[in-house]
Amino acid sequence: MGDTVLSTAALWNLRRYLPDAHFTILAGPAAFPVLELDPLWDRVEEYRREKGPRGRLTSVRTVRSYPHDLLIDLRSSAMPLFSGARYRPLWGLRELFLSKDMHETERNIWCMTTLGVPVYSRRLRFFIPEETREEAGKVMESRGKDNPWILLNPGAGGKNKIWPLENFVELGFRLVDTLGVNLGVTGYSETEQEAAARICREIGNERCGNFSGKHHITRLGALVERSILFVSNDTGPLHVASAVGTPSVGLYLPQHLSRFGPWGNIHRCLAAKTGEGDEPMRTICVEEVFDACMEILRCVDISGMQAVKWVSGPIPYR
């Protein structure tokens, strides 16, 4: 899901370059919800790629079943060769000459420039339906006072990427006590829902809103969009914050930061220290994260920031 969000700047540039083309997007199960409601695309289909030779043949047949003149594969695979498309660019070999530290968003934009696509914008895109925005507003208004919201996201795609829950609890206490803000916790999977419930229980459910659950990803985007800060492990929702323009603090393993860090929004990132045993994320202390949060909030005009984000809305392409 996060990789898909990081590809949206490149996709938006292509759409603007070819405004009258018919776009079909094939996206994996995790990526599909990011794109399925976006009116920018004519058709979005869920694409499940099976492993092994038989799975590859099935994938080729699936791709060839869609009428198309141009196939772009941002995974840099050899699929375009077998797609039957008139235009089938391959840039996997060219990518070998790129720096390994080049950000994933910039790599995707670079891929488009090799096709002659101008760079109109480097901003990420995340479409949120208006009714989802209204629903998120009602949920937050029912849970908190008029104070601004800060959201914590304790989940991640791997155990070694997770900052300890007790650290999120301590950070939450400090943010609420120091700033008097409303605090919320997000999460999707069963494990993340359990983590969110624990954090809210320890801080106090009257002081901490549990926004976790198996909701559509656009609901998360709407909640994050209405917040003044998003604190998260290295995972997809951190890139959603970048796309909707909410300042963020990202908690990373060092090898992932340069290529998969936040993009385009106000942010601070903290990287774990290497060679520190099986739980490297414990090397990021609460004091560091709290200081990063305060540094961001000191340079952000909280009173006007949300109004600017809500009025700006999604980027048109025509």
Image (tube, grey):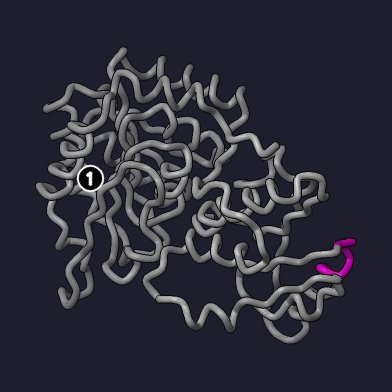
Left or right: residue 218 versus residue 253 is: right
Q: Quadrant of the C terminus?
A: top right
- Outermost residue on the top side: it is 146
In percent of width and height, residue 264 lies at 40, 46
Q: Is residue 212 left or right of residue 7?
A: left
Q: Residue at x 82, y 74 (%)?
A: 83
Q: Is residue 206 above or below residue 195?
A: above
* Quadrant location, the N terminus: bottom right
Left-right relation of 289 to 251:
left
Identify the residue under disc 1: 168
Give whichever of 268, 237 is nearer the camera.
268
Q: Which region shows up in magenta? A: 62-68
Name the foreground residue: 317 vs 185: 317
Question: Where 133 falls versus 124 (above or below)?
Answer: above
Query: In what element is the residue under mark 1?
Result: helix
Q: Is residue 296 left or right of residue 304?
A: left
Q: Which of the pair 250/206 is nearer the observer?
A: 250
Task: Indicate yes or no whether the magenta region holds residue 283.
Answer: no
